[in-house]
Image (cartoon, rainbow, N blue to C red):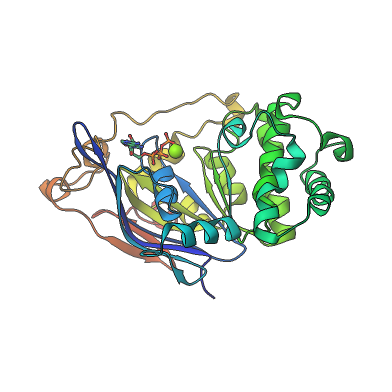
Amino acid sequence: MKPVLAVEDLTVTIGTRRGPAHAVAGVDWAVQPGETLALVGESGSGKSMSVLAATGLAPRTARVTGRVHLLGTELTGLGQDRRRRLRGRHIGFVFQDPMTSLNPVLTVGRQVTEAAEEHLGLTRRAARSRAVELLEMVGIPSAGQRVDAYPHQFSGGMRQRVVIAMALACEPDLLIADEPTTALDVTTQAQIVELVADLQRRLGTAVVWITHDLGVVAGIADTVAVMYAGRILEQGPVDAVFGTPSHPYTEALLAARPDPAAGGAELVTIAGAPPSPLDLPAGCAFWPRCPVRGDARCEHELPPLVPVSAGHQVRTFYPQPTDGERR
Ligand SMILES: Nc1ncnc2c1ncn2[C@@H]1O[C@H](COP(=O)(O)OP(=O)(O)OP(=O)(O)O)[C@@H](O)[C@H]1O
Ligand SMILES: [Mg+2]
């Protein structure tokens, strides 16, 4: 089966006044049809930039290298227009702030099907009834009336539902959701996560979900890639990565997870800070913060990504023992 979206050795280097910033320093991942890939990792690890670059949306100041395949078609080297059309037809986006995706002076009905009109050649009238259908699908009450309302007449959660309807209007093969619930209250967050999971089951859409919330990942993802300083430190099936984390960074992230039983307070944070993308170290980027760091090798030599079990890989010279061995 061909992956919906696959990146190979993707790098993104952004020119800044202080020199080149290595936002993404060589990542490989793929999302299979109907599956959810979660990208996790601390702020600045390159999660957003890797999906933006993969879909041709990196800033103009960025230099992107590597290979990207969308449904088997190599995107690298395609013209802007062709890439834009492929993206519009096959990928839907949901970002953190719904207002960045919505036009305040257009009714939600017009916006939901704007792209679909272009890509599917719908008439205005067909588009309106399709808009009502889509708004119903994402759980907007009284969709028949709300279709003529403007974004400011909706709550934050309802706006994000509208954006999801917009993203799904062209029946994309892939939905990219970049922290889609961060701006919402906890109850609404859970509803949006549930909505996307339900739509995915019904429509068979593949999803790339970027989040800081490892609880959500455990609930909805099939595979997970843990990013740090522009690289993947651990990736694989979510059960394997969370059940038997092999990289000390993954272990630390899991330990720093807020405990709902303790009222959701952040209990542990990882001491230290990631390196600057302007000055990535030659060796393991996590080395200065690593609790099990070994020797000069970690400092000077980049550990390769090595397999630990089926589909589960880790980038460290010191893979942690499996659960069975440890406990
Ligand atoms: N336009 C830009 N110019 C220069 N550097 C940038 C630009 N956009 C992002 N970066 C840098 O690229 C790196 C990766 O950024 P990215 O936005 O992908 O991180 P992220 O993992 O999505 O973080 P967050 O969780 O905060 O969204 C960061 O170090 C960031 O500072
Ligand atoms: Mg981001």
Task: Please tell me in which quarter of the rendered image ligand 1 is found.
Answer: top left
x then y, percent, for residue 308? 36, 63
**Can you see residue 227?**
yes
Judging depth in this view, the residue of 203 and 241 nearest the camera is 203
Query: Residue 140 vs residue 164: left or right?
Result: right
Quadrant of the frame with the N terminus: bottom right
Judging depth in this view, the residue of 196 and 40 nearest the camera is 196
- How many numbered marks does the figure carry? 0
Q: Residue drawn 63% across and 35% down?
A: 102
Judging depth in this view, the residue of 303 and 123 nearest the camera is 123
**Can you see residue 24?**
no
Placement of 154 over or under 318, stated as above or below: above
x then y, percent, for residue 99? 61, 30
Q: Residue drawn 15% across and 53% down?
A: 301
Q: Residue drawn 71% across and 44% down?
A: 112
Judging depth in this view, the residue of 302 and 31 nearest the camera is 31
x then y, percent, for residue 37? 52, 55
x then y, percent, for residue 38? 51, 50
Question: Image quadrant of residue 68?
Answer: bottom left
Q: Residue drawn 64% across and 33% down?
A: 103
Placement of 134 over or under 157, stated as above or below: below
